[in-house]
Amino acid sequence: MLSKMSISCSQLVILIVLLITIIVLALTVSQSYFNSSEINLLVKNAEEHGLEYKLVIHNQFTNSYSFQVADKINN
């Protein structure tokens, strides 16, 4: 016969907290990756077109940013 697994309430809470932590970490890493990729693309395109830009990184963990493009570089 199969025996039932017994999980105590504290073990269940620990498992839930661990699962939430893993999900939050995965989402943070993926957001950081996609923001970094987008920043690289924006900077590359601005430089190719000879545009001045202002890039401000607001959060180092998620790479949240603001990006502004000015008019063409004055000669």
Image (cartoon, grey):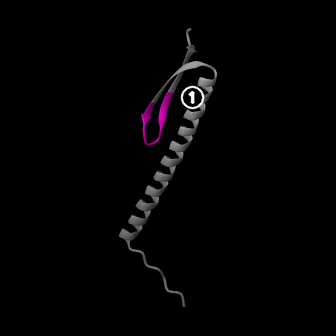
Q: Residue furthest left?
A: 10
Q: Is residue 35 above or below residue 66?
A: below
Q: Can you identify the residue that label 1 sits on?
A: 43
**Bounds of the magenta segment:** 57-66
- Residue in the image at 47% along x and 41% along y: 62
Crowding at mark 1 (Cα within 10 Å: few <14, some 14-19, many 20+): some
Instruction: Tell me where residue 22 appears, x and y as whole percent.
Output: 47, 57
User: Which quadrant holds residue 69?
Assistant: top right
Q: Is residue 20 above or below residue 60?
A: below
Could you tell whether 44 is left or right of 20 in the image?
Answer: right
Q: Is residue 20 above or below residue 63?
A: below
Figure quadrant of the C terminus: top right
Figure quadrant of the N terminus: bottom right
- Residue in the image at 53% along x and 87% along y: 2
Instruction: Tell me where residue 49 appears, x and y as whole percent.
Output: 64, 21
- What amino acid does circle 1 point to? Val
- Residue in the image at 39% along x and 65% along y: 14
- Residue in the image at 48% along x and 36% along y: 64
Instruction: Tell me where residue 57 appears, x and y as whole percent.
Output: 45, 32
Please, what is the dominant secondary structure of the magenta stretch? Answer: strand
Please, what secondary structure does the residue beneath circle 1 have?
A: helix
